[in-house]
Amino acid sequence: MRQRQAKFAIGDSVEHKIYGFRGVVFDVDPEFDNTEEWWQSIPADVRPSKDQPFYHLFAVQSDNSNPYIAYVSEQNLTAANPEDPIDHPGIGEYFAGQQGNGQYIPNNSVVN
Protein backbone atom coordinates (compact mmCIF):
# COMPACT_ATOMS: atom_id res chain seq x y z
CA MET A 1 0.00 0.00 0.00
CA ARG A 2 1.29 3.47 -0.86
CA GLN A 3 2.02 5.81 2.04
CA ARG A 4 0.43 9.23 2.01
CA GLN A 5 2.40 12.43 2.41
CA ALA A 6 1.90 13.85 5.91
CA LYS A 7 -0.36 16.90 6.01
CA PHE A 8 1.32 18.35 9.12
CA ALA A 9 5.02 18.85 9.88
CA ILE A 10 7.15 19.00 13.00
CA GLY A 11 6.43 22.32 14.69
CA ASP A 12 2.86 22.67 13.41
CA SER A 13 0.10 23.61 15.87
CA VAL A 14 -2.90 21.31 15.54
CA GLU A 15 -6.28 20.73 17.14
CA HIS A 16 -8.21 17.49 17.60
CA LYS A 17 -11.42 17.63 15.54
CA ILE A 18 -13.50 15.63 18.04
CA TYR A 19 -12.02 16.28 21.48
CA GLY A 20 -10.80 19.86 21.00
CA PHE A 21 -7.38 19.50 22.61
CA ARG A 22 -4.48 21.31 20.96
CA GLY A 23 -0.87 20.33 20.43
CA VAL A 24 2.43 20.87 18.69
CA VAL A 25 3.71 18.10 16.40
CA PHE A 26 7.11 16.81 17.55
CA ASP A 27 7.27 13.58 15.53
CA VAL A 28 5.45 12.00 12.58
CA ASP A 29 4.91 8.33 11.76
CA PRO A 30 4.05 7.75 8.06
CA GLU A 31 1.56 5.13 9.24
CA PHE A 32 0.40 3.67 12.55
CA ASP A 33 3.32 2.63 14.76
CA ASN A 34 1.85 1.90 18.18
CA THR A 35 0.66 -1.29 19.86
CA GLU A 36 -2.31 -3.31 18.71
CA GLU A 37 -3.66 -3.06 22.27
CA TRP A 38 -3.59 0.75 22.08
CA TRP A 39 -5.39 0.72 18.72
CA GLN A 40 -8.03 -1.76 19.94
CA SER A 41 -8.68 0.44 23.00
CA ILE A 42 -10.18 3.09 20.71
CA PRO A 43 -13.96 2.64 20.38
CA ALA A 44 -14.70 0.88 17.08
CA ASP A 45 -17.02 3.62 15.85
CA VAL A 46 -14.18 6.21 15.97
CA ARG A 47 -11.15 3.94 15.47
CA PRO A 48 -8.99 5.41 12.69
CA SER A 49 -7.45 3.49 9.83
CA LYS A 50 -3.82 2.49 10.39
CA ASP A 51 -2.71 3.43 6.87
CA GLN A 52 -2.37 7.16 7.40
CA PRO A 53 0.13 9.42 9.15
CA PHE A 54 0.02 9.52 12.94
CA TYR A 55 1.40 12.41 14.96
CA HIS A 56 3.14 12.65 18.33
CA LEU A 57 1.97 15.84 20.03
CA PHE A 58 2.84 17.95 23.03
CA ALA A 59 -0.84 18.33 23.91
CA VAL A 60 -2.92 20.47 26.25
CA GLN A 61 -6.62 20.94 26.83
CA SER A 62 -8.22 23.90 25.04
CA ASP A 63 -7.55 26.10 28.11
CA ASN A 64 -3.81 25.16 28.14
CA SER A 65 -4.28 22.86 31.15
CA ASN A 66 -3.31 19.23 31.73
CA PRO A 67 -0.18 18.86 29.53
CA TYR A 68 0.39 15.37 28.13
CA ILE A 69 1.73 13.50 25.10
CA ALA A 70 -0.85 12.43 22.50
CA TYR A 71 -0.68 10.08 19.50
CA VAL A 72 -3.29 11.08 16.92
CA SER A 73 -4.28 10.04 13.41
CA GLU A 74 -4.22 12.62 10.65
CA GLN A 75 -7.96 12.25 10.01
CA ASN A 76 -8.65 13.61 13.51
CA LEU A 77 -6.49 16.73 13.26
CA THR A 78 -6.93 20.20 11.83
CA ALA A 79 -4.62 23.21 11.90
CA ALA A 80 -4.91 25.19 15.14
CA ASN A 81 -5.11 28.96 15.34
CA PRO A 82 -1.43 30.00 15.16
CA GLU A 83 -2.09 33.00 17.40
CA ASP A 84 -3.05 30.67 20.29
CA PRO A 85 0.23 29.63 21.97
CA ILE A 86 0.39 26.13 23.43
CA ASP A 87 1.83 25.98 26.94
CA HIS A 88 3.42 22.54 27.38
CA PRO A 89 6.64 21.91 29.37
CA GLY A 90 8.08 19.68 26.60
CA ILE A 91 8.00 22.41 23.97
CA GLY A 92 11.11 24.15 25.33
CA GLU A 93 13.12 20.92 25.05
CA TYR A 94 12.33 20.46 21.34
CA PHE A 95 11.66 23.96 20.06
CA ALA A 96 13.56 27.25 20.18
CA GLY A 97 10.45 29.42 19.85
CA GLN A 98 7.73 30.40 17.41
CA GLN A 99 7.83 32.18 14.08
CA GLY A 100 5.33 34.90 13.25
CA ASN A 101 3.10 32.36 11.46
CA GLY A 102 2.79 30.24 14.62
CA GLN A 103 5.18 27.52 13.42
CA TYR A 104 7.42 26.26 16.24
CA ILE A 105 11.11 26.25 15.32
CA PRO A 106 12.93 22.98 16.21
CA ASN A 107 16.10 23.22 18.32
CA ASN A 108 19.22 22.27 16.41
CA SER A 109 19.67 19.32 18.78
CA VAL A 110 16.49 17.60 17.55
CA VAL A 111 16.84 18.27 13.81
CA ASN A 112 18.34 15.32 11.94
Image: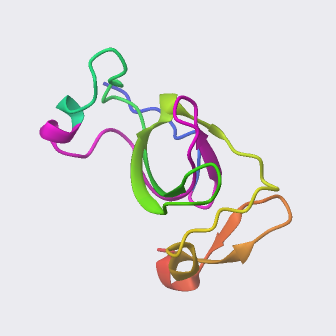
Residue furthest out toward the right: 100
Measured as percent of width and height from the top left, residue 84 is found at 77, 56
Query: On the rendered structure, is 57 left or right of 98?
Result: left
Q: Nearer the viewer, residue 63 or 84?
A: 63
> Bounds of the magenta span?
10-38
| Residue drawn at (61%, 42%) of the image | 15
Measured as percent of width and height from the top left, residue 109 is found at 50, 85
Measured as percent of width and height from the top left, residue 98 is found at 75, 70
Which quadrant of the figure has residue 16? Answer: top right
Q: Is residue 16 magenta?
A: yes
Query: On the rendered structure, is 59 left or right of 33?
Result: right
| Residue drawn at (73%, 62%) of the image | 85
Q: How many numbered marks are there?
A: 0
Residue 29 visible from this viewpoint: no
Q: Is residue 34 above or below residue 43?
A: below
Residue 39 visible from this viewpoint: yes
Colour setup of the view: rainbow
Measured as percent of width and height from the top left, residue 67 is found at 49, 63
Residue furthest out toward the bottom: 109
| Residue drawn at (27%, 30%) of the image | 42
Which quadrant of the figure has residue 106? Answer: bottom right
Q: Is residue 43 magenta?
A: no
Q: Is residue 68 above or below residue 41?
A: below
| Residue drawn at (56%, 59%) of the image | 10
Where's the N terminus, which quadrant? Answer: top left
